[in-house]
């Protein structure tokens, strides 16, 4: 039996404010940690030279061009669009008591534009950025006060958009904070495990508290978490490699466990002991954590291998150390392409939690070329997406409940890890290069028509 996608499956695409909007200092917006990560998350933050324009400052200029872009998403048949709200458009420094009306008005207009085409906004509250002011003067998420400030921001947007936004996510790839400390946490790169896990704890509490606020303010909304999920296959069948694979998967399953089950998993006790981590967790924190998410979401780009043999460790990925799988090919950036991994992942998460799952990122970063006739033949991207969606369909047939699929970078944007325009993910090409040159004009790629057919046929043409 060839099981199809559910009729109410949320087909769409995903972007994030700091990678697509640009307009970094427009209409009262404050600077965020992302505005200082001029070279991307993989690199330490830099100072901003006066008068200099950095790549994300303009990005894809979505801030000014969103009506055109959303019309194109609608043409593809999107049922949903995932983007984030920039906290610094709403509270420029993060600690004001009154929100910035111009920032709120921008997202009102953006969400209205989506709803005009029946595109449901799926909104991330925090995508790899926080107000720079809080990072510099308060110690970012290392400071417990940030929980309250984040709650104020979240409550403001829940109240403002309660009639427009019914799908929410708290922190993008919350587990990436273990590897990238400045952008997501507002901590210096190279912070100690003690500082990182304490800041992560504050984020987990903040996440649970805003889940509760969302349930109270918008009872008919659904709110989920978001984890960068990476299956780990034992490199050999040696039991030590199997145990190492389990240990590595627990690094990110930890986040799902807390956000889906409402408490720290017992395996973290030993992990914290080994890392000399002693967390401050108050009784109120434990109470707060009990408010769990309605659904689980994740990004999936690649799998990795795990080995107990230190010789096997090579760096081939972006933020994480990966061990090459001899059975897989990789993207130009060394990300291993593994469609079956998404089926494995969906089944694993469904078995473990029995909560609905939402694939909110998946895609191929590649260099695209405009042919002389103006076409962009990204058949490699079509192959990647097609093969992954076939495996999503298999997982649904296996019994996993999957709410939707938003491929990453529906329109070309600035890459998170390396701040490159040339690492393209979109169905829509944006004429801009790594030096910021280009007209910013949009062009449909070959994958545009392909995805349109996928959505129109509810995946029957895969
Ligand atoms: C995820 C992030 O890590 O992967 C996105 O949530 C990011 O923000 C995406 O863009 C792809 O990574 P990169 O580095 O290729 O942009």
Image (cartoon, helix red, strand yellow):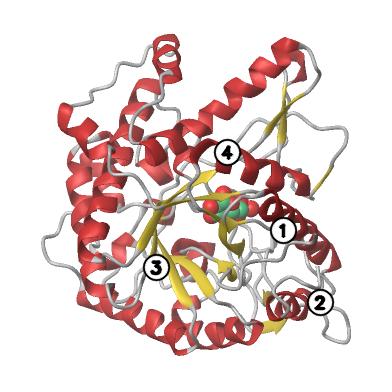
- Residue 24: numbered disc: 3
Is residue 309 visible in this depiction of the protein?
no
- Residue 351: numbered disc: 4
| Picture residue at 69% right of the left edge, 74% below the top | 458
Which badge, 3 or 4, comes first in the chain's sequence? Answer: 3
* Element class at badge 1: helix
Q: Position of residue 413 (x, y in %)?
A: 59, 66
Say few, some or many: other residues with alpha carbon within 10 Å of mark 4 (under 14 / 14 to 19 / 20 or more): few
Q: Position of residue 89 (x, y in %)?
A: 30, 67
Q: Quadrant of residue 414?
A: bottom right
Which badge, 3 or 2, comes first in the chain's sequence? Answer: 3
Q: Nearer the viewer, residue 219 or 157?
A: 219
* Element class at badge 3: loop
Which residue lies under the disc numbered 2? 376
Say few, some or many: other residues with alpha carbon within 10 Å of mark 1 (under 14 / 14 to 19 / 20 or more): many
Calculate the distance from the C-alpha at mark 4 to the C-alpha at mark 1. Answer: 17 Å
Say few, some or many: other residues with alpha carbon within 10 Å of mark 3 (under 14 / 14 to 19 / 20 or more): many
Is residue 175 visible in this depiction of the protein?
yes
Which residue lies under the disc numbered 1? 393
Q: Is residue 455 above or below residue 350?
A: below
Calculate the distance from the C-alpha at mark 3 to the C-alpha at mark 2. Answer: 29 Å
Q: Quadrant of residue 45?
A: top left
Which badge, 1 or 2, comes first in the chain's sequence? Answer: 2
Q: Is residue 347 left or right of residue 195?
A: right
Say few, some or many: other residues with alpha carbon within 10 Å of mark 2 (under 14 / 14 to 19 / 20 or more): many
* Element class at badge 2: loop
């Amino acid at each position: 039996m060839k099981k199809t996608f559910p009729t109410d499956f949320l087909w769409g695409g995903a972007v994030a404010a700091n990678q697509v909007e640009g307009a970094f200092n427009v209409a009262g917006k404050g600077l965020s940690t992302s505005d200082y990560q001029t070279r991307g998350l993989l690199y330490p933050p830099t100072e901003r030279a006066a008068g200099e324009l950095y790549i994300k400052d303009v990005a894809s200029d979505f801030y000014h061009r969103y009506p055109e872009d959303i019309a194109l998403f609608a043409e593809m048949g999107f049922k949903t669009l995932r983007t984030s709200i920039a906290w610094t458009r709403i509270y420029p420094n993060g600690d004001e008591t009154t929100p910035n009306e111009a920032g709120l008005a921008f997202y009102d207009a953006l969400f209205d534009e989506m709803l005009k085409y029946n595109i449901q906004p799926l909104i991330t509250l925090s995508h790899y950025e926080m107000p720079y002011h809080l990072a510099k003067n308060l110690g970012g998420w290392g400071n417990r006060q940030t929980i309250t400030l984040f709650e104020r921001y979240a409550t403001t947007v829940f109240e403002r958009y309660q009639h427009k936004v019914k799908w929410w996510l708290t922190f993008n790839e919350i587990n990436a904070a273990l590897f990238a400390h400045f952008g997501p946490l507002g901590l210096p790169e190279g912070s100690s495990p003690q500082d990182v896990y304490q800041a992560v704890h504050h984020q987990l509490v903040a996440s649970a508290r805003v889940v509760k606020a969302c349930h109270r303010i918008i009872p008919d909304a659904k709110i989920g978490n978001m984890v960068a999920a990476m299956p780990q296959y034992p490199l050999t069948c040696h039991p030590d490699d199997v145990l190492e694979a389990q240990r590595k998967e627990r690094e990110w399953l930890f986040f799902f466990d807390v956000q889906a089950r409402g408490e720290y998993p017992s395996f973290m006790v030993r992990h914290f002991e080994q890392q000399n981590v002693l967390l401050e967790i108050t009784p109120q924190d434990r109470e707060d954590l009990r408010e769990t998410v309605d659904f689980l979401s994740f990004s999936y780009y690649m799998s990795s291998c795990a080995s107990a043999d230190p010789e096997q460790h090579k760096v081939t990925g972006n933020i994480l150390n990966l061990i090459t799988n001899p059975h897989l090919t990789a993207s130009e950036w060394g990300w291993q392409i593994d469609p079956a991994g998404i089926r494995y992942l969906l089944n694993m998460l469904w078995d473990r939690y029995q909560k609905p799952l939402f694939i909110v990122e998946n895609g191929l970063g590649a260099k695209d070329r405009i042919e002389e006739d103006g076409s962009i033949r990204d058949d490699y991207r079509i192959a990647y997406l097609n093969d992954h969606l076939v495996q999503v369909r298999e997982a649904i047939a296996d019994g996993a409940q999957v709410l939707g699929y938003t491929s990453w970078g529906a329109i070309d944007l600035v890459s998170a890890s390396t701040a490159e325009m040339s690492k393209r993910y979109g169905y829509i090409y944006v004429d801009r290069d790594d030096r910021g040159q280009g007209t910013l004009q949009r062009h449909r790629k070959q994958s545009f028509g392909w995805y349109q057919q996928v959505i129109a046929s509810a995946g029957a043409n895969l």
